[in-house]
Image (cartoon, helix red, strand yellow):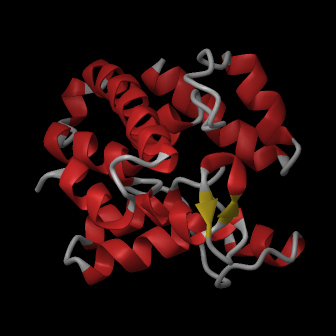
Amino acid sequence: MDPVEIVSRFFPPQSRSYRILIEHGRRVAGKARTAAARVAHLRPDLGFIQSAAMLHDIGIFLTRSPDLDCHGTEPYIRHGVLGRGIMDALGYPRHGLVCERHVGAGISAADIRRFNLPLPERDMLPVSIEEEIVCYADKFFSKNGGGAPPEKSVAEIAANLSRYGAGQADRFLRWVDLFG
């Protein structure tokens, strides 16, 4: 599997959205490799982590996110489930689960109901160590279209996640203890 080739199927390589997605994926992949090294005893699948980190946001082109040069019709929060659909259709269901489960620190069915989110009502929480690693690494890097923003601090990430319930920040902080 060549993640960059897959991205090229959906994002024109000369577009700003392509550059944003590839740069973000590379940064997440680097952080994820470092996290995986810290839990080598758990035997995470490094090749899968690398490709999943590059593809976890593939669904953004279907969202209304002009700051990212994405001009679809869907709300941004749906990019994970949309990415799952894409990856499932391509025959990569494990990658699809990473797409779906990386949003926030994962989203529970209860939170989908509680916040009336435009998502299927099911748990979308990272389950495998690889899913957790990619989700954790993703939280450190924004996509804003204005170049590579600096890596976020743990405190900044936890504060942002806590706006969506204590469970979000608590889950992330458990990952910090494990991976950081």
Relative depth, front residue between 103 and 66:
66
Q: In which quadrant of the rendered view does residue 122 lie? A: bottom right
Judge from the rendering whether residue 160 lies leftward or rightward of residue 83; answer left or right. right
Judge from the rendering whether residue 156 lies leftward or rightward of residue 12; answer left or right. right
In the picture shown, does residue 78 fall above or below 149?
Answer: below
Judge from the rendering whether residue 114 lies leftward or rightward of residue 16; answer left or right. right
Relative depth, front residue between 10 and 84:
10
Image coordinates of residue 156 in percent, x first then y, are 77, 22
Judge from the rendering whether residue 55 lies leftward or rightward of residue 103; answer left or right. left
Image coordinates of residue 10 in percent, x first then y, are 36, 66
Image coordinates of residue 9 in percent, x first then y, are 28, 66
In the picture shown, does residue 106 fall above or below 16?
Answer: below
In the picture shown, does residue 122 fall above or below 48?
Answer: below
Image coordinates of residue 94 in percent, x first then y, are 28, 65
Relative depth, front residue between 73 and 36:
73
Residue at image coords 37%, 46%: 14
